[in-house]
Amino acid sequence: MTKRTITCIICPRGCSVDVEINGEDISVSGNSCPRGEKYALDECTHPMRTVTSTVRVSNREDTMVSVKTADPIPKENIRDIMDMIHKTEIKAPVRIGDRIISDICGTNVVATKSID
Ligand code: SF4
């Protein structure tokens, strides 16, 4: 049996949610609402993360543009996406929401800042 305690981050209440996994049997307790149960189950079975980083702007001196994944990605793919982000350079101008990297780990990487 595996036991984990997860702090739910869905709302500011921050419930401490206990998850017990025994083969196919999974029990969740300590959550104050169903969203906490889903969050804790997802964290234990397929954790997802939104990745944030920066990409170099090649035609502006010492300039980086902040980026993020448009959707959460599986936690085990973070290294792959960070490697691709670090290899990427773009040219200004760039607008918030512009697609910087397409179709990576089931999502896109988009700009979160505009640079003229
Ligand atoms: S379990 Fe519900 S009430 Fe508790 S932190 Fe999560 S979302 Fe908020």
Image: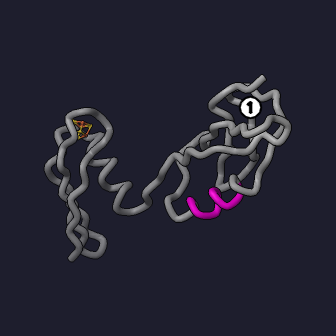
* Residue 33 in which image quadrant: top left
60 with respect to 37 (left or right): right
43, above or below 95, in the image = below
- Is residue 83 part of the magenta span, yes or no? yes
Task: Spot the residue most to the top.
Answer: 116
Magenta span main SS: helix
- Viewer-nearest residue: 52 or 25: 52
- Amino acid carrying label 1: it is Asp
65, above or below 73, in the image = above
| Quadrant for the C terminus in the image | top right
* Residue 59 in which image quadrant: top right
Q: Secondary structure at mark 1?
A: loop
- Viewer-nearest residue: 8 or 52: 52
Q: Give how far across and how far down residue 112 sits, in percent.
A: 62, 31
Q: Residue placed at 74% from the left, 26% from the top?
A: 115
**Image region (quadrant) for ligand 1:** top left
112 with respect to 17 (left or right): right
Label 1 environment density (alpha carbons within 10 Å; few <14, some 14–19, many ≥20): some
| Quadrant for the N terminus in the image | bottom left
Q: Residue placed at 73% from the left, 40% from the top?
A: 62
74 with respect to 55 (left or right): left
Q: Give how far across and how far down residue 9 sits, in percent.
A: 31, 42
Magenta residues span 78-84
Residue named by callout 1: 98
Q: Give how far across and how far down residue 60 sits, in percent.
A: 80, 35
97 with respect to 17 (left or right): right
Task: Spot the residue most to the front.
Answer: 61
Q: Give how far across and how far down residue 42 sits, in percent.
A: 38, 54
Q: Residue placed at 59% from the left, 63% from the top?
A: 79
